């Protein structure tokens, strides 16, 4: 009978729940596999029972994320989790047999996260464009005209020391100016 494969997307929060369900139902953990992707690191957990293999995939894992270990239930997964840490920089928490970054004797940290110079240049350019857009949007917010309420408050502060007759004339002119601005804004 051929092996039936299933691929299921899940989240970091689902790892422990799925691990416990598989353990309770008599499944075996087969592998934990990392792949470097555009949105971060993809981690695939494979479990098998009978002729069924279920592959659970977490997308977009970053170095800032904490990934719970499954080695408390499936001790044989410790090499895979140490590899995820050493080669991809994944922050796996609670590995039963943790080599603390010494599972591989590496010339450089996290060698599998290296990207091509072209891809790095494209990412850097995209980051600069995004930062420029964000700065432009922030500047637009900061330099935007004050609200009508703020304009009124500023105006009243300016005319507070004038005599009432002068204040009335200036208020009329100010209100006419606001009305004209409102009409132009429509």
Image (tube, rainbow, N blue to C red):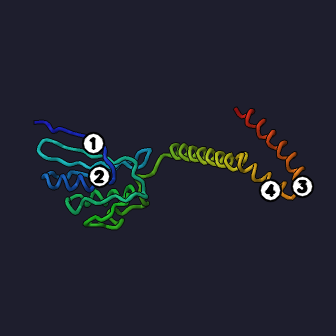
The kind of secondary structure element at disc 1 is strand
Residue under label 2, please give it: 14
For the N terminus, which image quadrant?
top left
In x, y percent, where is residue 144?
A: 71, 46
Most distant residue in the front direction: 165
- Label 3 and label 4: CA atoms lie apart by 13 Å
Cα–Cα gap, marks 2 and 1: 11 Å
Badge 4 or badge 2: first in the primary sequence: 2
Q: Quadrant of the C terminus?
A: top right
Q: Nearer the viewer, residue 2 or 70?
A: 70
Q: Where in the figure is residue 41, as x and y percent of width and height?
A: 39, 50
Mark toward the viewer: 4 or 2: 4
Is residue 77 or residue 161 the one in the foreground? 161
Q: Quadrant of residue 122?
A: top right
Q: Residues within 10 Å of mark 3 (few under 14, many from 20)?
A: few
- Image coords of residue 42 (percent x, y): 36, 48
In the image, which disc is placed on residue 8?
Answer: 1
Viewer-nearest of labels 2 and 3? 3
The residue where tag 3 is placed is 163
**Residue in view at x 34 percent, y 60 percent:** 92
Q: Residue 175 at x, y = what percent?
A: 79, 42
Where 129 falls versus 22 (above or below)? above
Disc 3 vs disc 1: Cβ atoms closer than 8 Å?
Answer: no
> How far is disc 2 from disc 3 in space, using C-alphas?
71 Å
Q: Nearer the viewer, mark 3 or mark 4?
A: 3
Q: CA distance from mark 3 to mark 1?
A: 76 Å
Q: Nearer the viewer, residue 57 or 172?
A: 172
Mark linked to residue 157: 4
Q: Earlier in the sequence, mark 4 or mark 1?
A: 1
Of tags 2 and 1, the one toward the viewer is 2
User: In the picture provided, is 93 more to the left or to the right than 121?
Assistant: left
| Nearest to the observer: residue 127 or residue 108 | 127
């Amino acid at each position: 009978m051929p092996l039936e494969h299933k691929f299921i997307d899940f989240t970091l929060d689902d790892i422990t729940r799925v691990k416990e369900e598989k353990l309770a139902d008599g499944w075996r953990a087969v592998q934990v596999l990392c792949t470097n992707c555009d949105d971060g690191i993809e981690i695939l957990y494979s479990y098998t029972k009978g002729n069924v293999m279920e592959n659970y995939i977490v997308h977009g894992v970053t170095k800032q994320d904490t990934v719970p270990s499954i080695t408390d239930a499936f001790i044989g997964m410790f090499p895979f989790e140490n590899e995820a840490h050493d080669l991809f920089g994944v922050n796996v928490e609670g590995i039963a047999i943790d080599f603390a970054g010494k599972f591989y004797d590496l010339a450089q940290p996290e060698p599998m996260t290296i990207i091509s110079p072209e891809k790095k240049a494209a990412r850097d350019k995209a980051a600069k464009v995004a930062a420029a857009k964000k700065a432009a949007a922030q500047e637009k917010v900061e330099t935007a005209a004050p609200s009508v309420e703020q304009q009124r408050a500023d105006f009243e502060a300016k005319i507070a020391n004038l005599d009432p007759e002068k204040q009335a004339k200036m208020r009329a002119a100010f209100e006419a100016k606001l009305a004209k601005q409102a009409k132009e804004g429509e």
